[in-house]
Structure formats: structure tokens, C-alpha cells
Image (cartoon, helix red, strand yellow):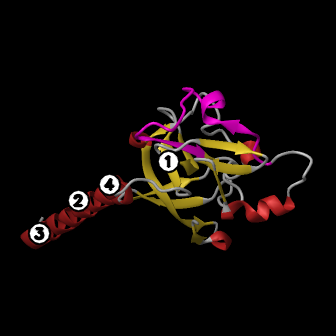
Amino acid sequence: MTEEKQSEWVSWLKAFIIALFIVWLVRTFLIVPIKVDGPSMEPSLSDQDFIIAEKISYYFSKPKRFDVVIFHATEEKDYIKRVIGLPGEKVEYKNDQLIINDQIIDEPFLTDLLNQWSADTPFTGDFNLTDDISGGFESIPDGYYLVLGDNRQDSTDSRYKSIGLVSEDEIFGKARLIYWPADRISIVN
């Protein structure tokens, strides 16, 4: 092999290694593609949507109410849910109303769903932090969040003992963009 060809191969190899390193950096610290698995976040996110979640926000700030977050639910499974309750808050649902610290809080992302929902059954069943959420807390402890799916009738979320309140350490990303299918490309609200 001539010296010129060998130099070209080395250049290509360096470029390939640098590209792999950049991809690793971006996926590890900045963004990650995720496929939605299941109907728990409908209509905000649909089953089989592909989304981009960014990781950097939570290096510098804490999750906020109504952020759509990705967290490690088990060692094998990550879940996508919406933050409803923040540390220090007393949270309950009564008559399809979110009540935080004795104040009714609107959930604008549910408006269309609630307008279509039958009044015969509640969209979100009544529950409170003390009696119905694993741990029996009076208020959400520091470093933990109450998360729910938007599709309250079909969501495994903080209301289930297997999930309960989610530790801040388990939250690793914030959903930002639906990028596939093409007809659903949009910013995640």
C-alpha cells in the first residue's frame, strides 16, 4: 500500500472514530431517541410515536409541573409520563379535579379529552397521596414526583404500587419533539 493510500485510510479512520465519539457524547449527555410503547400518554403521544428526549435540562434544573418526562420505571423498562405533583405538595383528585395544596389546578392538556368524555364515569378516579399512593405520605417527599399518563384510564403510573412516586434520580429526560410518523411531527406540550 502506498504512503498516500495509507494516509487516506488513517484520515478516514480518525474521522470515523471522532464521529462515533460525538454520537456517544450526544446520546449520553444531550438527547436520546425514544419509541413510545403503549397508549398511556394519548393523545399527547401515541403508541409507536418516535420522540426526541433531551437530557441536559435536568442537569441544571428540576422537573416542573406538566413536564413530560422519561424515567427508569424498572431495570428493563423506561416510562414516559407527565409530572403532576412536585416535592412538598399535597396532591389529590376529586370529581375529576386535580387538587394541589387545597387549590384546584387546571390541566389544559386534558381539555379536549374531558370535553369528549362520558360524564357517567370519572376520567381520573379519585385518589389521595396518603391513602392511595405507595408510601402513605402526607406530602410528596423531597426528591420525588407524582407522575400520571394523560390517558388516565389506561396508564401505569404513580397510582400503582409498582411505580409509586418517582425519584428525581430516575428521571433522565424531557420529551421535546415527535419526529415520526411524519404526519405527527410536533413539539411535545
Image position, residue 189 (x, y; %): 58, 66
The range drawn in magenta is 123-147
Distance of mark 1 from mark 3, alpha carbons? 57 Å
**Left or right: 17, with 49 as reference point:** left
**Left or right: 84, with 87 as reference point:** right
- What label sits on residue 86 in the rendered view? 1
Distance of mark 2 from mark 4, alpha carbons? 27 Å
**Left or right: 151, with 103 as reference point:** right
Q: Which residue is drawn at 67% across and 63% down?
A: 109
- What label sits on residue 115 in the rendered view? none
Residue matched to label 2: 17
Mark 2 secondary-structure assignment: helix
Q: Which amino acid does label 4 sit on?
A: Tyr
Q: Earlier in the sequence, mark 2 or mark 3?
A: 3
Q: Quadrant of residue 157?
A: top right
Asked if the residues shown at circle 4 and circle 1 are in contact, with their CB atoms under 8 angstroms apart, the answer is no
Q: Which of marks 1 and 3 is nearer the N terminus?
A: 3
Q: Residue at x 57, y 59 (%)?
A: 50
Mark 4 secondary-structure assignment: helix
